[in-house]
Image (cartoon, coloured by chain):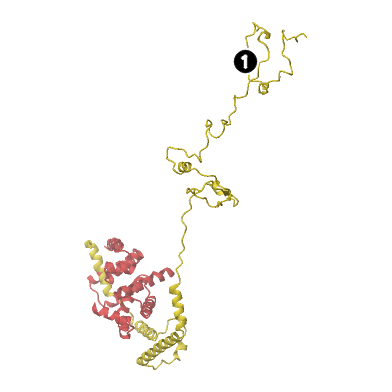
Amino acid sequence: MKEGIALLKAAQKLDEEALTAIFDQFAPAIYKYTLRLCHDPIVADNIVGDVFAQLLEQFGAGKGPRTNLRSYLYQTAYHLVVDRSRDNQHNAPLEVAAGNYEAGQFSPTQSQIEERVMMEALISAMNTELTDDQRHVIILRFLEDFSLKETADIMGKEINNIKVIQNRGIAKLRKAMGLQLEEDW
Amino acid sequence: MDLDPEDQEIIRLLGKIKDVEGGYPEHMLVSRRHSYLKRMAEINLGIPADTGLRDAIKDVKPSHISPATSTLVETALVVAIIAEASTVAYFYRDRLADFFRRTSLEPRRQEVTPPAAVETLPEIQEITPSSALTVTVPSATTWSPPTPAGITITSTGTPFPEVIPSVVDNINTVTPGEVNLLNATPGPNDSGGNNGNNGNHYGQTPKPERTKEKGNNPPPKEDKPPKDKEDKPPKENEDKPPKDSKDKPPKDNNGKPPEK
């Protein structure tokens, strides 16, 4: 944590090493998060570029995050994704992740195949059953490991509201997975 | 957070998705990092974003003045400004002293709002006091009534009658139970000073004298009840004075003129 704060203070002084370290540390995570939301590698890459460009401008103007850099970067990415989704209603399924999963497995066992089927069903349910808010909360809470408060800060909502959205999203996924399993068996 | 076992299963699967997902493609990451470093260099040089002045600024060489030199120059400039201000103040000290004296001795003017005027009747407001109104003080006593605004009191050359000290004392020392004789209106029955004429002459007209004899009156008729003379309103002739007996001789013998 101290390293993070020291890194943030150095970045506020426009230290090149600190700024480079921030990019190397957070750019892949922001890309993954953005890719989960917009499902387009090129759009995700552009959003990553916009996020860090805004960060540099904020530091250059003497502004920017003071405590939680990670939450600030995800919040910026979240707003950019929301703005783009309003302009372009592009909702491709999370096939990138599923494709990578399939490519990474050379000789799957029976249990691995069953788990792969369940994960595909889960990804499908996330793309089809959940609302945008529910999907964002699920991603931030369980794929990016943010706390309830951090998730609330990123999305600009109350903690109780985040809890409600999360519970409803999980209930929908559970229901969809149960139906999926019944169909499979 | 309380979650059902089925929910825990969902969360476990979500964690597996996180572990399996692919990362940032290498060629994209390198390209993005390069553009980021370029932008960072521009920010460090103080070049604002999206200005389009990049080419113009490229030709500008950074100055080679060291920070110590710049500090020295700044200090010299501040000292020069202070010295110049002191010199100007010395040459114009008289004017400055006058100016400060004027500002310090200038009396402060305070705007005073008059208190709310006493409500006056509209009738009173309409009366315009005449400048020709003159009040003559009848006596030279120590009593001086309050003079209303707009009324001029002038003393005339009319000699004042002698004032009886006892009367003056009565006028000046009016006890609550007494009446101020100077200002009191005389009553109708007051006899002092008006010769018994109180102005009311009703019923004081002299009655006309009776000229006929008593025996000449015809006897009253029985049919008609005698009229009450008192009910009749007084005739206009009654107000007239009685005729002189010389004009008409008194009648004798039932209205016949006396035999000569």
Amino acid bearing label 1: Lys
Crowd tier of the residue under label 1, counting other residues whose Cα lies within 10 Å: few below 14, some 14–19, many 20 or above: few
Horizontal placement of A53 versus B202: left or right? left
- Where does the image place residue B71, in percent across and percent down from the top left? 36, 90
Q: Quadrant of residue B61?
A: bottom left
- Where does the image place residue B125, in percent across and percent down from the top left? 55, 49
Q: Residue furthest bottom?
A: B64
Horizontal placement of B181 versus B219: left or right? left
Q: Residue furthest right?
A: B260
Q: Colour of chain B?
A: yellow
Relative to B206, does residue B5 appear above or below in the rendering? below
| Count of residue discs | 1
Q: Secondary structure at mark 1?
A: loop
What is the chain letter for disc 1? B
Q: Quadrant of residue A117?
A: bottom left
Relative to A108, does residue B201 appear above or below in the rendering? above
Q: Which residue is the site of mark 1?
A: B229
Horizontal placement of B139 versus A74: left or right? right
**In which quadrant of the rendered image does the N terminus of chain B lie?**
bottom left
- Where does the image place residue B110, in percent across and percent down from the top left? 45, 65
The residue positioned 39% from the left and 89% from the top of the image is B79
Relative to B183, does residue A70 appear above or below in the rendering? below
Q: Quadrant of residue A98?
A: bottom left
Horizontal placement of B196 versus B12: left or right? right
Most foreground residue, A120 or A165: A165
Does residue A117 appear in this view? no
Most foreground residue, B18 or A178: B18
Q: Colour of chain A?
A: red
**In which quadrant of the rendered image does the C terminus of chain B lie?**
top right
- Where does the image place residue B21, in percent across and percent down from the top left? 29, 75
Does residue A85 appear in this view? yes
